[in-house]
Image (spheres, helix red, strand yellow):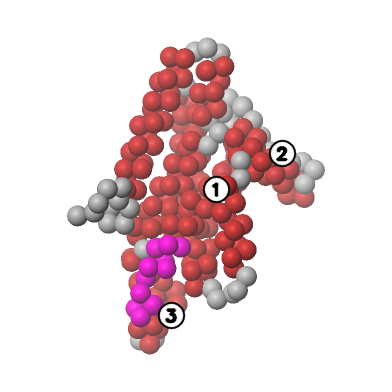
């Protein structure tokens, strides 16, 4: 069991989930309440990681973060080291490919808030920020928890994008999914099974939390 890869993966997933909570909430709020007719293009752009092969997405992100790109050159001149194949690059790539798993549940929960409550709050003289904090957020807790947990789980198990952006550097970018692949390639099936089992248990617990929070909405069998 490679605990170094395990804790690096957990740290990556925690950071990415926290960033997606901060970034995804305003994006989802804008998508929910914006009347711009072209917002479907933004929705399609955010949802791209769901349908694109991870290696394709990873290749484009690698090109965007590489030393020949403006972002890569700026980062290197600022920090003195490249962005690709580093933990920071892994965070940026992970935020991009997990973005729809946070934004879509957030937007779904915001759209479920009764507009009459927002109008009532506005008529009482409350500012949009205060209305969002006192009305929208409390009524959207289930969606926020779902988006946070799903983005954590998705980051935890991603392989293709991580390999393209981060490579396989021990202690820096070797995540648990890449470690499983390495163990299988080396014929260490016992170690690979143990690591895969741990990932399976964590994923099951995470999804149990999601279904538990949304048990009134998502049910496989007939709801009672």
Q: Mark 1, mark 3: which one is toward the viewer?
A: 1
Q: Mark 3 sits on what residue?
A: 127
Residues 221 and 182: in front is 221
Quadrant hosting residue 196: top left
- Give the image location of residue 82, x and y in percent: 71, 39
Give the side of residue 56 with respect to residue 124, left or right.
Answer: right
Give the side of residue 69 with respect to residue 59, left or right.
Answer: right
Q: Mark 2 sits on what residue?
A: 82
Q: Which image quarter is the N terminus in?
A: top left
Q: Is the residue marked by circle 3 packed among few (<14), some (14-19), or many (20+) residues within 10 Å?
A: few
Measure the alpha-carbon separation of dots 1 and 2: 28 Å
Asked if residue 213 shows in the view, the reply is no
Q: What are the residue bounds of the magenta stretch?
A: 107-118
Residues 26 and 150: in front is 150
Quadrant hosting residue 137: bottom left
Mark with earlier residue (1, 2): 1
Residues 148 and 72: in front is 148
Q: Residue at x 42, y 20 (%)?
A: 193
Please tell me whether residue 132 is drawn above or below residue 66 in the rendered image. below
What label sits on residue 50 in the rendered view? Answer: 1
Q: Which image quarter is the C terminus in?
A: bottom left
Magenta stretch: includes residue 203: no
- Give the image location of residue 77, x and y in percent: 76, 45
Please tell me whether residue 80 is drawn above or below residue 219 in the rendered image. above
In what element is the residue under mark 2? loop
Please tell me whether residue 216 is drawn above or below residue 37 in the rendered image. above
Q: Residue at x 53, y 52 (%)?
A: 99
Asked if residue 46 shows in the view, the reply is yes
Magenta segment's dominant SS is helix
Q: Is the residue marked by circle 1 packed among few (<14), some (14-19), or many (20+) residues within 10 Å?
A: few
């Amino acid at each position: 069991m490679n605990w170094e890869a395990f804790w690096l993966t957990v740290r990556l997933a925690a950071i990415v989930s926290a960033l997606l909570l901060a970034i995804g909430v305003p994006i989802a709020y804008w998508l929910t309440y914006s009347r711009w007719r072209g917002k479907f293009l933004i929705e399609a752009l955010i949802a791209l990681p769901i349908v694109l092969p991870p290696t394709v997405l990873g290749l484009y992100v690698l090109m965007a973060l590489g030393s020949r790109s403006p972002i890569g050159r700026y980062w290197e001149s600022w920090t003195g080291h490249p962005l690709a194949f580093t933990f920071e690059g892994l965070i940026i790539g992970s935020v991009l490919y997990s973005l729809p798993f946070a934004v879509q549940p957030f937007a779904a929960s915001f759209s479920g808030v009764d507009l009459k409550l927002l109008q009532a709050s506005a008529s009482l003289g409350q500012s949009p920020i205060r209305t969002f904090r006192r009305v929208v957020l409390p009524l959207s807790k289930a969606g926020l928890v779902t988006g946070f947990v799903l983005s954590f789980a998705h980051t935890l198990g991603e392989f293709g994008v991580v390999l393209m952006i981060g490579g396989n550097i021990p202690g820096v970018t070797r995540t648990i999914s890449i470690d499983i692949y390495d163990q299988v390639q080396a014929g260490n099936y016992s170690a690979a099974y143990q690591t895969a089992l741990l990932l399976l248990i964590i994923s099951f617990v995470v999804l149990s939390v999601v279904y538990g929070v949304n048990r009134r909405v998502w049910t496989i069998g007939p709801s009672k």
